[in-house]
Amino acid sequence: MQIGVYMKNPKKTRRSRAKKINRSRRGNMLVFLMLLLLGGFMLLPVVYTIVQAFKPMEELFLFPPRFTVVNPTVKNFKLIGQLINNLWVPFSRYLFNSVFVSVAGTAGNVIIASMAAYPLAKNNFPGKKLLFKIVMVALLFSGGVLGLAQYIIMAKLHMINTYWALILPSVATPMGLFLMKQFMEGISDSLLEAARIDGMKEFGIYWNIVMPNVKPAWLTMIIFAFQGMWAMTGGNFIYKEELKLLPTALAQIQSGGIARAGVSAAANLLMFLPPVAIFLITQSSIMETMAHAGIKE
């Protein structure tokens, strides 16, 4: 028996070595180089946005466009501060409106989508397939198509010129529901059954077992939901100046034409930073959880 085991191990070793030898270093280098070039190409808009914000006026309109700045300046950001002080509504109010709407809408989106996806993924009830088909059809509609219907509903509910008019339409998104359902279907049913046998209620199973195992899904939802909410102007539902969002205030500042081109570049950079910061904060958690979360039957 010992000889047999001894004779088998060298074969496995030779096979593993053969597999390692068959891997082409040139092929790996070529793939790495292609990914590096693709990543650099995708990074160009980010670099250009940052560089533009620090360019003086005489460098903004050079052709061809340059990805470097010869004489960097912070004058554009100082000018934003001066223009902000001249606004009728304090700038802090616009900032609070955007932060509150973005955080509330993102949190509501994650909670509602996950709570709706849990029974669709892990429970059987009449009409389940029909409901999911409706969700699939809803994925085909863009936000612009639903604008008029949303306005009529908000007007009937007397929510025009309130935060609810911005938060509620963003809470129920079919993409978030679809994403959460697909992730929840990968959770082992035996794990949930064991929790039920131990006496755990459905909400406890959802919150303590399901949500930690679908962490990649709701972290991804946070990134996309916050990005969409942060860039939203809310002009279709909000007419009171004190309730308008930050993009509206910055659009007013940028409306001075060519003379404010530098201010526009600086404002674009300021709007660009919060979504990027959230992505950088959650990226490691997403990759780690996607590699380790869940169990297999």
Image: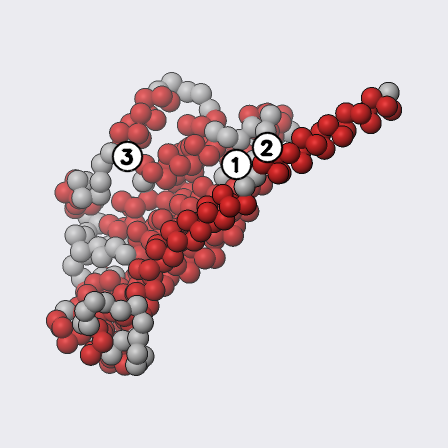
Total residue callouts: 3
Helix, strand or loop at label 3? It is loop
| Residue situated furthest top in the rendering | 126
Residue at figure coordinates x 87%, y 24% from the top left: 2
Is the residue under label 1 in contact with that under label 2 (CB below 8 Å)? Answer: no
Q: Which class describes the residues within 10 Å of circle 1: few (<14), some (14-19), or many (20+)?
A: many
Depth check: give the residue in front, 207 or 37. Answer: 37
Q: Position of residue 235 (x, y in %)?
A: 18, 56
Seen at 47% across and 52% down, the residue is 283
**Residue identifier under label 2:** 295
Residue 105 located left or right of residue 183: left
- Residue annotated with mark 3: 139
Dot 2 lies on which element? loop
In the rendered structure, which amino acid carries the disc numbered 2? Answer: Ile
N-terminal of the pair, mark 2 or mark 1, is 1
Mark 3 and mark 2 lie on one chain; the one further toward the N terminus is 3
Kind of element beneath mark 1:
helix
Q: Seen in the image, is 1 located left or right of residue 222?
A: right
User: How far apart are the alpha carbons under marks 1 and 3?
Assistant: 24 Å
The C terminus: image quadrant: top right
Q: In terms of image quadrants, where is residue 97?
A: bottom left
Gap between marks 3 and 2 measured at Cα = 29 Å
Circle 1 is placed at which residue position? Answer: 210
Rounded to the nearest angstrom, the CA distance separating label 2 from label 1 is 12 Å
Of labels 1 and 3, earlier in sequence is 3
Q: Nearer the viewer, mark 2 or mark 1?
A: 2
Give the answer, above or below, for where 77 lies relative to 129: below
Q: Is residue 170 above or below residue 58?
A: above
